[in-house]
Image: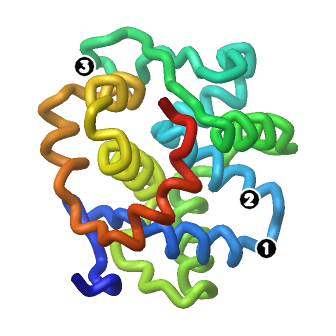
Amino acid sequence: MDENIKIFKSGIRILRPCEVKAITNAIPKMEHKDKFEALFYTGCRYTELQWLYKNQDAFQKSTILMPSTKPEARHKERYIRLNGNGIRAVMYFLRSKRNLPAYSGWDENLIRWCLKAGIDPKGISCKSSRRTWESWLATMYPHNFQHIFLSQGHTDKISLEYYLMLPFNDEDKEEMKFYTDGWI
């Protein structure tokens, strides 16, 4: 399989580990790296992470107690599970001087960082980190699928539709271990 094939689901780009690493390295300001990593390692919706910044007591060492931000949600709250990387990312994000900017500003930042990293920005948006994280967890922990979709605030139907059977190659899976290790 060609490792250069771009992965999309409903027009949103799902990143490979080498792309996440390249984007992270292309981000010039540490505060922006902290925000990018918090979005990535939590799999939070953009508005959820903005909410967490204002409600820091919801961060409970290895989990985040997240109320639903969607009126149609079946679960009114959920625990977002974090591994060691996620705990560090949230702690660093919460020390930021400012919350996340508006969606449009973050999307512009992501496109600029992709270009700086030599990555085609087609399909990149603030949704990319969430979709990438859940895809990686589903790839690395298929036997814990139910834990993954509940932690991410999805139904099994949504998770099956978006996050399984993506064309990650063996090299991707090997590199994903660094990021996902300890989630279960």
* Residue shown at 50% from the left, 74% from the top: 19
Please indicate whether residue 118 sits to the left or right of residue 161 in the image: right
Marks 3 & 1, CB-CB < 8 Å contact? no
Q: Amino acid at mark 2?
A: His
Please indicate whether residue 59 sits to the left or right of residue 131 in the image: right
| Residue in front for this viewpoint, 154 or 177 | 177
| Residue in front for this viewpoint, 68 or 150 | 150
Q: Which residue is denoted by mark 1 in the rendering?
A: 28
Q: Amino acid at mark 3?
A: Glu
* Residue shown at 64% from the left, 52% from the top: 37
Q: Nearer the viewer, mark 3 or mark 2?
A: 2
Look at the image and tell me in which quarter the N terminus lies: bottom left
Quote the CA–CA distance across marks 3 and 2: 31 Å
* Residue shown at 47% from the left, 54% from the top: 129
Quote the CA–CA distance across marks 2 and 1: 8 Å
Quote the CA–CA distance across marks 3 and 1: 38 Å
Q: Which residue is denoted by mark 2 in the rendering?
A: 32
Q: Which residue is denoted by mark 3 in the rendering?
A: 72
Let me know if residue 97 appears in the view: yes
Let me know if residue 55 appears in the view: no
Colour scheme employed for the rendering of this structure = rainbow
Q: Is 67 situated above or below 39?
A: above
Marks 2 & 1, CB-CB < 8 Å contact? yes
